[in-house]
Image (spheres, grey):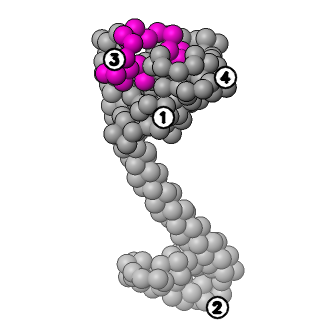
């Protein structure tokens, strides 16, 4: 009787095992259940053949665990594959960013070298700003160039701007000294607005001390009423100084 039961169960298990490939081919969201079912059927058949009903139950349980483990391993492998794909995409994007940054850096270095060559080819870069009689106002047409000069000088690390104010010889010397100082300060303020640091300016006031105009020559006087701005390179920060000269206005005013 026992042998006949074993035989019947084995036949049933074998029949189930024969149908297992059809289940294994099923697609869809039931893949986990199918894998586990296949394991159960396989374990059932093997257990039944080896140990009868008890073996069939043990085999079914073991087969179910093996089927579930196989499915989990498959899911893990798919997740790792997806992560690897994302990592490759990120690496490609980062490589493209590095290439772009390298190109920008090379372009900046080329521009800096061109600027360095331009500045080294001239003895001085600067401009002169003229003023009306007894006036410290900067003309509208001079403001734009001053802003550009301040911006240019700011891009050169070892450069400073020497700002020197002058006046024509008419009037009191002390007043002319103070007038030339105010003119130089007005120009310095425009350069700072352009981007040049205040501590990189050397501000001087010369009054009428350097005038060579003939007395009464109004055209020559116009050239005396000025502020000169010159870019100097290789000057240490300690060399920058502000020369302030002040004085009371004498009768007759200054020029």
Label 2: how many Cα within 10 Å (few below 14, some 14–19, many 20+) = few
Judge from the rendering whether residue 158 lies leftward or rightward of residue 64; answer left or right.
Answer: left
Element carrying mark 4? loop
The label nearer to you, 3 versus 1, is: 3
The label nearer to you, 3 versus 2, is: 3
- Marks 3/1: CA–CA distance: 19 Å
- Marks 4/2: CA–CA distance: 134 Å
- Which residue in the structure is indicated by mark 1? 135
**53 or 252, which is in the foreground?**
252
**222 or 122, which is in the foreground?**
222
The part of the image, by quadrant, that contains residue 120 is top left
Specify which label sits upstream in the sequence, 3 or 4: 3
- Marks 2/1: CA–CA distance: 130 Å
Who's the residue at 43% across and 24% down the image? Answer: 225
- Which residue in the structure is indicated by mark 4? 247
Judge from the rendering whether residue 229 lies leftward or rightward of residue 220; answer left or right.
Answer: right
The part of the image, by quadrant, that contains residue 244 is top right
- Marks 3/4: CA–CA distance: 26 Å
Label 3: how many Cα within 10 Å (few below 14, some 14–19, many 20+) = few
The label nearer to you, 4 versus 2, is: 4
């Amino acid at each position: 009787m026992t042998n006949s039961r074993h035989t019947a169960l084995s036949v049933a298990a074998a029949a189930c095992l024969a149908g297992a490939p059809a289940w294994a081919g099923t697609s869809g969201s039931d893949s986990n259940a199918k894998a586990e079912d296949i394991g159960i059927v396989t374990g059932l058949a093997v257990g039944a053949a080896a140990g009868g009903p008890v073996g069939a139950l043990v085999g079914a349980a073991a087969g179910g665990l093996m089927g579930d483990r196989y499915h989990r391993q498959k899911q893990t492998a798919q997740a790792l594959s997806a992560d690897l794909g994302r990592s490759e995409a990120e690496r490609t994007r980062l490589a493209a960013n590095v290439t772009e940054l390298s190109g920008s850096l090379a372009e900046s270095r080329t521009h800096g070298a061109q600027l360095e060559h331009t500045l080294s080819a001239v003895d001085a870069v600067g401009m002169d700003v003229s003023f009306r009689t007894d006036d410290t106002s900067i003309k509208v047409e001079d403001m734009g160039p001053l802003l550009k000069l301040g911006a240019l000088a700011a891009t050169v690390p070892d450069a400073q701007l020497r700002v020197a104010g002058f006046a024509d010889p008419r009037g009191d010397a002390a007043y002319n000294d103070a007038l030339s100082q105010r003119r130089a300060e007005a120009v310095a303020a425009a350069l700072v607005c352009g981007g040049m640091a205040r501590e990189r300016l050397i501000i001087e006031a010369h009054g009428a001390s350097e005038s060579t105009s003939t007395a009464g020559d109004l055209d020559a006087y116009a050239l005396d009423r000025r502020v000169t701005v010159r870019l100097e390179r290789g000057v240490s920060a300690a060399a920058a100084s502000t020369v302030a000269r002040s004085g009371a206005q004498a009768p007759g005013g200054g020029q």
